[in-house]
Amino acid sequence: MEQKQPSLGISLVPVITLMILLVINILVYKDDATGGANQIALLISAALSITIGIFKLKIDYKELEEKVLDSIQTAMQANAILLLVGSLIGLWILSGIVPAMIYYGLKLINPSIFLPVACIVCSIVALSTGSSWSTTGTVGIALIAIGKTLGIPEGMVAGAIISGAYFGDKMSPLSDTTNLAPAMAGTDLFTHIKHMMYTSIPAIVLAIVGFSILGLFYGQGDIASNNIDQVLDVIDSSFSIGVHLFIAPALVIFMVYKKVPALPAIAVGCLIGAVFALVFQSSLLVKMAGGSFDGLKTYKILISTAFGGFSIDTGNKLIDSLLNRGGMSGMLNTVWLIICAMIFGGALEGTGMLQKIANSILGLVKGAGSLIGATLGSCLFFNMTACDQYLAIVVPGRMFKKAYDDFGLKPKNLSRALEDSGTVTSVLIPWNSGGAYNSGVLGVATLTYLPFCFFNILSPLVSAFLAGFNLTIERKDS
């Protein structure tokens, strides 16, 4: 039987269904929506897409199943990284690495400037490594704990971390997305980075100003001071703290800088964490083993920390909440969410609905400004439906490349628009791999940190503003 092409109305049915279910989940489950409810919503919407594909569009089920499995396959690396990062967090707490970051951070950082400093530090690390995920998964977890101790809302801290990490990632020649965008648009890397300065620098400056203003209202007074003293005392008495512990994160950052793939770099970080725990935290291990050294019990502690996270009872709820986390098991909800999201994206793509919606958006373009606006909107749409930032760059890049040529625009305009929205908005979508990863690693719900991801919100807005007023838009005859 001949396969039919979906209409725009039919194509929007699964998307609208998903949006309705997600809104209901937020109202009912609030921050716990990603613990299962959103996963079910994605599966229901995927099932609806497949049902329409089989009975309305006459597509063979096996063909749709293959598309779904291909979509899941694209997320397997992200899921493997997530599981390893879970182990890394647990082992780095046990080894004293994260406690040392917290300890020295609390001693050095003034509460009133913590938010802008966190943003700038993450910008530098991500610029050096080209990886927002590595930045939030290492430096970010320590900054979250420091911010919590200072009495700053975790959503604000996560927003500052993510803003800095994504700015650095976006502007780094080592970043995979920064290389992918110009490749899709047909321009070169450094032309692309230079052109992004017009949108990214104003966005990050405004973000830092915003964090500086917020910092004036938080982390002040006796409560923050008491929290700091308590955390410092307990860390000092529970762990052997020293600057030598920073060797581990420095080695991981160096490996990422040297373009060692993420999986082996994080795996080495886990191994270093286990070694550091044995060498530098022997007293803690003896205490956790029951008061005497026991090889098998020590092995069990290390393995349990890797898969189940670090656990300690200090008698102080604040400190326990800072340190009792990590482990592969803590990432399983996030892995589950990503798999369900990719099932939905694969179902939409397999039925042709994704392409139909994309082509309909392209049909609305009337000029250069609306073309860039359509590109920004399409990247956000694909982040919401395809659930992956790479697809949110690749698909609109392919879709709009000829249109930019037809309108006489240089390819760097397209590559900039792809990154101004495709890269940075992925972290704002709870079921996108970017949003799921950062929420899982930082322990902060996506919708909690979303309002404070100033750079990620401002980047597409600044880009749209410049396009609307025909500013910094370069044409082929100029």
Image (cartoon, rainbow, N blue to C red):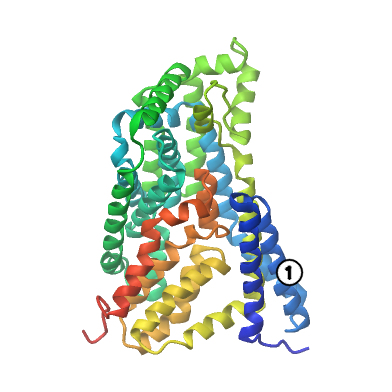
Viewer-nearest residue: 390 or 36: 36
Q: Quadrant of the C terminus?
A: bottom left
Going by the numbered disc 1, the residue's amino acid type is Ala
Q: Residue furthest left?
A: 478
The residue located at (66%, 55%) in the rendering is 28
89 w.r.t. 296: above or below? below
Q: x%, y% of residue 96?
A: 45, 26
Up/down of 269 relative to 346, above or below: above
SS of the residue under disc 1: helix
Q: Quadrant of residue 24?
A: bottom right
Please indicate whether residue 249 sits to the left or right of residue 282 in the image. left
| Residue matched to label 1 | 47
Residue at (64, 66) in percent of width and height:
70
Q: State the image coordinates of residue 159 (x, y, percent, origin top left).
A: 41, 51
With 134 as the anchor, is 174 left or right in this view?
left
The x, y position of residue 203, in whole percent, is 31, 61
